[in-house]
Image (cartoon, rainbow, N blue to C red):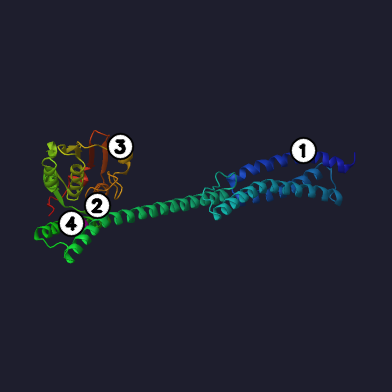
Amino acid sequence: MSETLRILALIGPITVATGLTALVASRLVARAGLAATMIAIAVVASLVTVIDLVALNHFMLISPSDRIEVVLVAGYSLSAGVAAALIVGHTTTRALTRITGVARRLGENQLDARVGDLRASPELRQVGTALDLAAQRIADLIETERRTEAARRDLMTSISHDLRTPLANLRAMVEAIDDGVVDDPGIVREYSAQMLRSIQTLVAMVEDLFDLSQVDAAAFRTDARSIAVADAVRHAVELCDHDARAKSIGVHTDLTSAADARCSAKLARVLDSLVDNAVRYTPTGGSVTVTATTVNGALELSVQDSGVGLTGGQRDRVFEPFWRGDGSRSTRGSGLGLTLAQRITHALGGEIHALSGPGGGSLFRVVIPDDRSLQGSGVDAQ
């Protein structure tokens, strides 16, 4: 056997060990980082060259003066380093190809494209994670924009619908009086009363829209004005007294442990909306009960009616702006009362829930923590 073949036979096991080392390096690249791995490969290749030359020379298997044998060993060492670099580089190339493909798909508006888990260096994993996060944020922003646009269209449609009826009534009556079609004093007075009601409807809608735009959690929580719970309930009942009498609806109150408690002045607006809504959708001869209690320091307000109740789908939408239980939208109101009640309650750090079933009446419950409701400054709202 020639010396060259003998050297190759001795180098064979070292070659296998070097290959296994490269495979291990390809797995470690996911932990060590790309730069550190490349440096390690260069160092290992250099050390392999030196160790091979020293070992073979020590055992006199190679002569430093034999250029062919020296070049052979050096070539092997270089090949081992290149092989290790290729194995590690394959992992990196695969990860970069995946990232590039996802970026291209995102550029083509395929916003569901994701890089996912990468078996690559920490640097490339960070790039993949950042790309996925950016894609998710873009998708969320687009979805939010779509929902906002849909809500804007619904808002404009609802406002247009609710404004059209009172404005049309006003126009018809004014034209009738102005053209002399109606000149009887009694009918003119009746028209005047109807015009006043239409104007009041428009004013109420504008005020609700303004209040809705002014709801701000920070401002609400720093508002120290308070009002007695009994006064807030009394005010809500008095506001709907005319409509309740007209429909023979009994409105009852039960303040129990909250009779002497105080609450945020903003809660009066919530109670006004809940009681008014209950009276509006309770049939003739029905009843409405307003309850206020304190439980574990929190204030609970509930308004129960004996109306037709709400279905599951209606409960899901009852707090939407301009949504109404009657599809014809024939009842009075702007459709913003419950929306305002919900936003005011949330701004005060509380919760409001609609609990009811078809035929069993509706129950609206408001729960406000004590530090938002019972710790007012004691200054009554005007």
Q: Which mark is drawn over residue 13?
A: 1
How far apart are labels 4 and 1 at the CA level? 97 Å
Residue 311, numbered label: 3
Task: Tell me the element at label 1.
Answer: helix
In front of the other: 96 or 341: 341
Task: Say whether marks 3 and 2 touch (CB < 8 Å).
Answer: no
**Foreground residue, 381 or 61?**
381
Q: Which percent across, then down, holds residue 133?
A: 49, 50
- Looking at the image, tell me whether mark 3 or mark 2 is earlier in sequence order: 3
Sequence-earlier tag: 4 or 1 = 1
Cα distance, mark 1 to mark 3?
Answer: 78 Å
Mark in front: 1 vs 2: 2
Marks 3/2: CA–CA distance: 21 Å
Question: Residue type at mark 4?
Answer: Gln
Upstream in sequence: badge 1 or badge 2: 1
Numbered tag placed on residue 334 in the rendering: 2
Amino acid type at image mark 3: Thr
Secondary structure under tag 4 reads helix
Residue drawn at x 28%, y 38% is: 310
Q: Earlier in the sequence, mark 4 or mark 3?
A: 4
Displayed quadrant of residue 304? top left
Mark 4 to mark 2: distance in Å?
A: 11 Å
Rendering coords of residue 250 (x, y %): 12, 38
**Secondary structure at numbered mark 3:** loop
SS at circle 2: loop
User: Which stretch appears magenta?
Assistant: 198-203
Label 1 is placed on what type of residue? Pro
Residue beneath disc 4: 200
First in residue order: circle 4 vs circle 2: 4
| Residue 317 in sight from this viewpoint | yes
Task: Give the distance between the C-alpha atoms of the residues marked 4 and 3, in whole angstroms.
Answer: 31 Å
> Is 119 located above or below residue 213 in the figure?
above
